[in-house]
Amino acid sequence: MTPDPFFDTIRRGLQAFMSLVAGGVSAGLIMLGASLFAGPYGLIIGVPALLIWPIGMLVIGAPVWAILHWRGLRSRSVARTAGVAGGAASVLLMAALIFGPSGGWIMVLLLTLAGAVSGIVGGHVVWTLAYGGRDVRAA
């Protein structure tokens, strides 16, 4: 029995949505934990990151994922690289705006590293849920 194209599209859309949310929550938890190593001021970014990461995965991650998917870039290494780039860039921008003017560049670097690590986790979780943990070749 072949699946109905309409419901198959709905199912795939929900699967993509849930994998993006799961990736965002995973990355947010990693960011929260990693920010604790940056001292008490790390919580200024860590706690909001737990809430912002899932939203960022839907607003920014979804279009990036769609572009990578349509271009046939569906491997684990591409997902992790995109996660590192997105995680590090977003945290670097936020940390530089908060801590940079006061000369807290060590804090900026530590939090950017935490953002990169959380980005790897988020990208890997999305890739695993979306592609079943295996590299998929473009059709």
Image (spheres, rainbow, N blue to C red):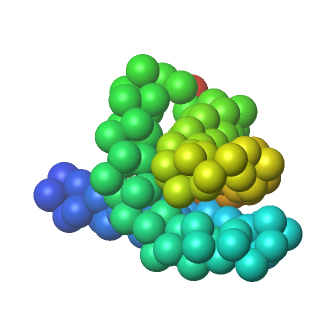
Tell me what residue is drawn at x 71 percent, y 33 percent: 77
Split into 4 quadrants, where in the image is the C terminus? top left
Tell me what residue is drawn at x 43 percent, y 40 percent: 65
The picture quadrant where one finds residue 45 is bottom right
Residue sitting nearer the eye, 91 or 23: 91
Residue sitting nearer the eye, 14 or 21: 21
Residue 25, x across and y down, in percent: 55, 72
Residue 2, x across and y down, in percent: 29, 55
Residue placed farthest to the left in the image?
A: 6
Tell me what residue is drawn at x 66 percent, y 33 percent: 81
Residue 126, x across and y down, in percent: 56, 55
Residue placed farthest to the front in the image?
A: 102
Position of 119 compared to 64: left or right?
Answer: right
Tell me what residue is drawn at x 42 percent, y 21 percent: 71
Position of 50 compared to 5: left or right?
Answer: right
Residue 42, x across and y down, in percent: 70, 70
1, above or below 69, in the image: below
